[in-house]
Image (tube, helix red, strand yellow):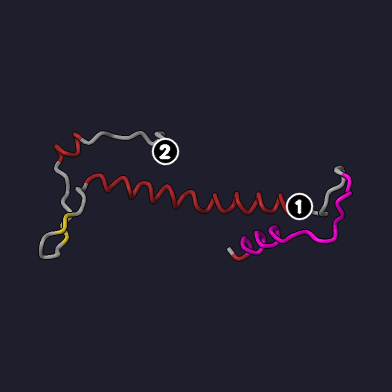
Amino acid sequence: MTRFLCTVLLTALPVAGFSQDTPKDEPLIEGLDDLADGMQKLFESFTDEVTPLMEDLAEQLQGLNAYHPPEVLPNGDIIIRRKSPKELEETPKKDSDEVIDI
């Protein structure tokens, strides 16, 4: 994570010492391609590590459909009731490919 923050901060710094009349064919910063390749590898490794965690979280969240929303009683107790098998059958199944617009 520290490498990620350092890389982001270094890319965000203004590039000093370059004149406005630099030809378009010449790169402004030598090694910019290497930096881009490094960033791509960093993001790929990040997604490789996070993807299994997100899939596990999605599986756990699907189990929440077996419960009713929490109820707060007048005395402050919170009850989370499990749905009956009949209620579970009535619950429409959502496809995992369905896109939700936020």
Residue furthest to the front: 20
Q: Amino acid at mark 2?
A: Asp
Q: Position of residue 25 (x, y in %)?
A: 87, 42
Question: Foreground mark, 1 or 2?
Answer: 2
Q: Quadrant of the C terminus?
A: top left
Which SS class for mark 2? loop
Vertical position of residue 93 compared to residue 13: above or below: above
Name which residue lies at 67% across and 60% down. 7
Residue 25 relative to residue 34: left or right: right
Q: Amino acid at mark 1?
A: Asp
Q: Position of residue 71 (x, y in %)?
A: 16, 55
Q: Position of residue 50 (x, y in %)?
A: 50, 52
- Mark 1 — residue? 34
Vertical position of residue 91 compared to residue 65: above or below: above
Name which residue lies at 14% across and 37% down. 86
Which SS class for mark 1? helix
**82 inside magenta stretch:** no
The Cα atoms of the two marked residues, 1 and 2, are separated by 36 Å
**4 inside magenta stretch:** yes
Q: Which residues fall within the magenta stretch?
A: 3-23
Q: Quadrant of the N terminus?
A: bottom right
Q: Position of residue 44 (x, y in %)?
A: 60, 49
Residue 30 relative to residue 10: left or right: right
Comes first in the chain, label 1 or label 2: 1
- Mark 2 — residue? 101
State the count of labels: 2
- Would you call the spot at circle 2 few (<14 residues within 10 Å), some (14-19), or many (20 or more)? few
Residue 23 relative to residue 80: left or right: right
Name which residue lies at 88% across and 49% down. 22
Name which residue lies at 17% across and 49% down. 82
